């Protein structure tokens, strides 16, 4: 049985990655083989946090050889899925091109899956993720105003989400046929088409349909706003998942908060956030989204992306 080509899913963050990892890539019945829960944390150590002056491609490859070998024996598609491979904008980490260089240096042959999302919704999701992880800044402080003084940049940089630049870089380095782009909006509106495209690209074989239950749902807008205050007294442990009792307690409190407080209480916060993002980005993404539509064949305008010109892509 011929071995399937390695698939490397680089994110982006907040594009249904947890669902893909748990419901698709970690399930051999779906035709894939990855690490536990589908999230390849080993890839963070190997390609993201690696000392750039001491990176060793051979050592990085050896980390994944057992999984790739097992997938070959079982006729499954080996998968490395880790959204931090595409950068970590919620925390100001931008290293996309460096990681791609390291992946190419490490593996002889692989395909890349890039998952995207409408940018205004993405900016808000990235901000909420940052707060959920212990952030205390306001939305404006995180995404900036666009008028920062020379030498200063916001943590979450709106220009990072110009997807056409990522796609063109990947295709230049790997070739068109080795890059697949799938929008989160397609996953939500037509999950069958989404999976058919993924299976066709990877060569995975399955007759099973994955469950569509939401994964890694965030806090409500109101709970997120309150978290920016309480996070000052319950900061997360930056060195691992073992968290303080204060943080565990507050996460539990907000879990219950979102189940007893009406969603209508969050409407004001949501409206203010959307206005802030609209003022910040304006028409920033129009040309990029038109270009991305041309590159991918997706009518992004009909999916809610800003494309200008009457919003027709």
Image (cartoon, helix red, strand yellow):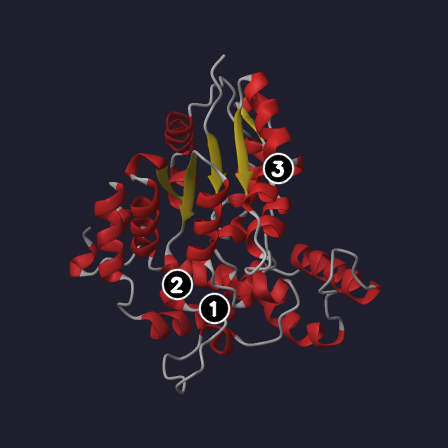
Left or right position of 288 against 94: left
Mark toward the viewer: 3 or 1: 3
- Tags 3 and 2 in contact by the CB under 8 Å rule? no
What is the CA distance from the residue labelled 3 to the residue labelled 1? 34 Å
Quick one: 299 or 156, which is closer to the camera? 156
Quick one: 65 or 138, which is closer to the camera? 65
Q: Which mark is residue 160?
A: 2
Residue 167 coordinates in the image, percent (x, y): 32, 49
What is the CA distance from the residue labelled 3 to the residue labelled 2? 32 Å
* Residue ID at (28%, 58%): 306
User: How many C-alpha atoms fall within 10 Å of the one at disc 1: few (<14), some, or many (≥20)?
Assistant: many
Mark toward the viewer: 3 or 2: 3
Q: Which mark is residue 281?
A: none
Single out the residue that lies furthest toward the bottom. Answer: 149
Say above or below: 24 vs 302: above
* Residue ID at (52%, 68%): 92
User: How many C-alpha atoms fall within 10 Å of the one at disc 3: few (<14), some, or many (≥20)?
Assistant: few
Residue 54 coordinates in the image, percent (x, y): 59, 57
Q: Which residue is mark 3?
A: 62
- Indicate which disc, 3 or 2, sits on the residue closer to the N terminus: 3
Left or right position of 196 against 222: left
Q: Secondary structure at mark 1?
A: loop
* Residue ID at (52%, 49%): 83
Quick one: 310 or 2, which is closer to the camera? 2
Is residue 51 shown to the viewer in this render? Answer: yes
User: How many C-alpha atoms fall within 10 Å of the one at disc 2: few (<14), some, or many (≥20)?
Assistant: some
Q: Which residue is mark 1?
A: 156
Residue 67 coordinates in the image, percent (x, y): 62, 30
- Tags 1 and 2 in contact by the CB under 8 Å rule? yes
């Amino acid at each position: 049985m011929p071995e399937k080509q390695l698939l490397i899913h680089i994110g982006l963050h907040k594009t249904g990655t947890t669902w893909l990892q748990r419901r698709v890539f970690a399930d051999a019945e779906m035709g894939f083989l990855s690490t536990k829960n589908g999230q390849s944390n080993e890839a963070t150590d190997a390609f993201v946090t690696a000392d750039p002056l001491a990176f060793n491609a051979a050592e990085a490859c050896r980390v994944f050889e057992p999984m790739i070998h097992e997938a070959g024996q079982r006729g499954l598609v080996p998968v490395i899925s880790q959204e931090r491979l595409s950068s970590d904008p919620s925390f100001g980490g931008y290293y996309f091109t460096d990681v791609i260089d390291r992946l190419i240096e490490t593996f002889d042959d692989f395909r890349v899956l890039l998952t995207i999302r409408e940018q205004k919704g993405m900016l808000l999701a990235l901000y909420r993720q940052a707060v959920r992880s212990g952030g205390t800044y306001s939305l404006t402080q995180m995404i900036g105003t666009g008028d920062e003084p020379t030498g200063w940049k916001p943590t979450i940089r709106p220009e990072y989400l110009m997807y056409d630049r990522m796609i063109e870089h990947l295709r230049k380095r790997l070739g068109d046929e080795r890059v697949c782009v799938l929008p989160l909006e397609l996953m939500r509106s037509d999950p069958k088409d989404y999976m058919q495209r993924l299976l066709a690209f990877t060569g995975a074989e399955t007759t099973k349909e994955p469950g569509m239950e939401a994964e890694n749902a965030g806090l409500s807008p109101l709970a997120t706003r309150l978290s920016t205050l309480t996070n000052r007294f319950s900061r997360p442990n930056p060195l691992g998942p073992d968290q303080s009792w204060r943080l565990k307690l507050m996460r539990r409190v907000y879990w219950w908060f979102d189940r007893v407080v009406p969603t209508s209480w969050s409407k004001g916060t949501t409206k203010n956030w959307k206005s802030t993002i609209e003022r910040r980005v304006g028409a920033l993404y129009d040309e990029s989204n038109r270009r991305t539509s041309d590159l991918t064949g997706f009518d992004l305008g009909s999916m809610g992306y800003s494309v200008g010109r009457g919003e027709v892509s």
